[in-house]
């Protein structure tokens, strides 16, 4: 159930940030940065583990 809450909160964040960007006209960089931060923060609050293994493998990050 927490995943459903997280998806709904994430969609609400994205929708509201788009509306705020239209109203205040701030740069898209700040919009996307705040989207990522807030979605990650709510994942933390809901204790959802986000694995970055596939992302690291795809972009060859943190290679030894």
Image (cartoon, helix red, strand yellow):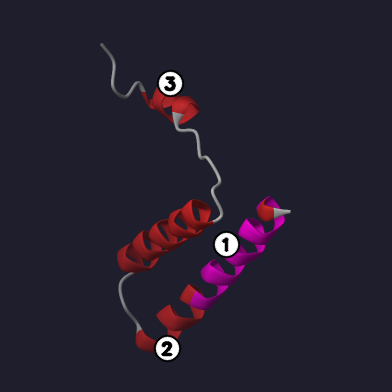
Marks 1 and 2: which is nearer the front?
A: 1
**Residue under pointer 2:** 23
Residue drawn at x 36%, y 87% is 24
Tag of residue 32: none
**Of residues 23 and 52, the one drawn nearer to the viewer in this rendering:** 52
Quadrant of residue 59 within the rendered picture: top left
* Extreme residue toward the top, this view: 64
The alpha-carbon separation of the residues under discs 3 and 2 comes to 39 Å
Above-or-below relation of 39 to 48: below
**Position in image of residue 62 (x %, y %):** 28, 22
Residue drawn at x 50%, y 81% is 19
Tell whether position 9 is magenta: yes
**Of residues 54 and 29, the one drawn nearer to the viewer in this rendering:** 54
Tag of residue 10: 1
Residue drawn at x 47%, y 52% is 44
Q: Earlier in the sequence, mark 1 or mark 2?
A: 1
**Residue under pointer 3:** 57
**Of residues 43 and 13, the one drawn nearer to the viewer in this rendering:** 43
Residue extent of the magenta highlight: 3-16
In the structure shown, which secondary structural element does the residue marked by tag 2 occupy?
A: helix
Q: Earlier in the sequence, mark 3 or mark 2?
A: 2
* Quadrant holding the C terminus: top left
In the structure shown, which secondary structural element does the residue marked by tag 3 occupy?
A: helix
């Amino acid at each position: 159930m927490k995943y459903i809450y997280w998806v709904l909160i994430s969609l609400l964040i994205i929708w509201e940030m788009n509306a705020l960007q239209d109203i205040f006209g701030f740069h898209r960089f700040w919009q996307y940065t705040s989207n990522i931060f807030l979605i990650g923060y709510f994942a933390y609050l809901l204790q959802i583990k986000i694995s970055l293994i596939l992302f690291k493998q795809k972009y060859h990050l943190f290679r030894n």
